[in-house]
Every structure is written in structure tokens, then in C-alpha cells.
Amino acid sequence: RKEVEQDPGPFNVPEGATVAFNCTYSNSASQSFFWYRQDCRKEPKLLMSVYSSGNEDGRFTAQLNRASQYISLLIRDSKLSDSATYLCVVNTAGGFKTIFGAGTRLFVKA
Amino acid sequence: DVKVTQSSRYLVKRTGEKVFLECVQDMDHENMFWYRQDPGLGLRLIYFSYDVKMKEKGDIPEGYSVSREKKERFSLILESASTNQTSMYLCASSSGGIYNEQFFGPGTRLTVL
């Protein structure tokens, strides 16, 4: 089993739709979590951190469920510009251990 | 504006050649990383460095070495390139705690023939 797993998609949604991605992790000692966005043929860039209390940034909401060991990303009112690959990142204490998920591809259609 | 640059966007080398990939950051970050990205596998950490002349192995260090002689520069070396090292190579840097945001360079797409 992979340490961090994501549904590769692709998710094809119309503009204005709400879409959600999950990312599961296997190590219960994981401490910090992020969502990165990667556009086609570009480098990953931080989208948002994920906190235990959940956090929101405009149309984006990130949640952490420690009991079930997953993080989620919700995108409301999807825009064409949201089309990208979304990578979840899980950090574990006890030595540097940052694991990137393989990513979930999102296509938003007009 | 933060910036991480990589020496080449595209590189084609032959099997057995020694390959140098250079990464420079202008943010005075302590931590620097080398990843490779392959379809379906995501980013995998090759090596990282948390200080000048310091290096730590990541998940897939075999066949690679690194050098960090100056704070702003982190080099990845393929001692004898092989076809299974054909990949996208991404450099990143971060400040402070190792779990802080990483800033990535544009990547080098290396093809080994």
C-alpha cells in the first residue's frame, strides 16, 4: 500500500460545479499536511496548508480527518483556471519524511 | 519575488555519461531538495540538504549524488546515466522548519538515450 494515495482522476466537471478530492495516508504519526497545485508542464506550487480545524481560502476548503487518516480539498464554483493536478503532501516527524501523492487531475469545462 | 532556477529545461544525454543538474535559489533558504517526478508515481525525494555541505538521502538516492558548496546552490549528479533515469527533475527550497512550504524550480526534463 502506498504511504499517500490519491484518486488519479481525471475529474471532468462543468464550470460552477463543486468538486472534492480525498487523499489518504497510512502513517498515523504524520504531522503536517498540504495541498499543492501543478499546472501542465509547470512546477508544483503551494495551494494551502491543512489544519486540524480545517481551513478555507476563498473557494477552497481543506479538511483533515485524523481518525480516518485522510485530508480533503473542496473547490466550489469551479473556474476554467482551476484545471490542474492537485497534489497532497504529508509530513511525518522523526526524520525528514515528506511524501507527495501522485496527484488528482481536474478538468473544468465551459 | 521568490525564485528557484534550474540550469536546463531540457537535457538529452547518452547512457554512461556523467550528468550535472544545477539549482540556484535566491531566497537565502537553508533547505534544498531534489525530486524526480514520473507519471503515476508522483514526486520522489532523491536527496535533500539542510545546510551547506550537509546532505541526507531521500527515498531513491541510488545512482545519484549531490553537492552543496554554497547556500544558494544545490547540484544533482548522475555518475553514470542510465535509461531508467529519464525523468523530470525538480529542485525545491524552503526556509526554517523542514515542513514549511517548498518553492520549486521549473524542472529539468532529462532524457537518457
Image (tube, helix red, strand yellow):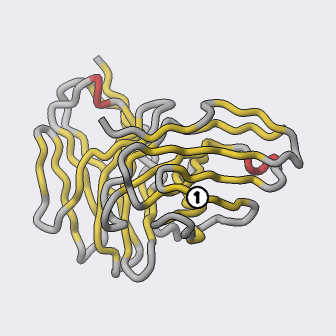
Q: Which residue is mark 1?
A: B69
Would residue A6 be found to the left or right of residue B83 on screen?
left
Q: Is residue A68 left or right of residue A16?
A: right
Q: Is residue A17 above or below residue B61?
A: above
Residue at figure coordinates x 34%, y 81% from the top left: A29
Q: In which quadrant of the rendered view does residue B67 lie? A: bottom right
Tell me what residue is drawn at x 77 percent, y 33 percent.
Answer: B12
Q: In the picture, which quadrant includes the C terminus of chain A?
A: top left
- Farthest-out residue, top: A110
Label 1's element?
Answer: strand
Residue B24, image x, y percentages = 50, 44
Question: Percent x, y for residue B83?
Answer: 81, 46
Q: Residue at the far right: name it.
A: B16
Host chain of mark 1: B
Residue B71 location, x and y as percent? 47, 56
Q: Determine crowd level at label 1: few under 14, some 14-19, many 20+ residues with C-alpha closer than 10 A.
A: few
Which residue corresponds to the image point at 29% horizontal and 68% vertical from the top-left? A32
Three-letter code, disc 1: Glu
State the residue in front, A89 or B78. Answer: B78
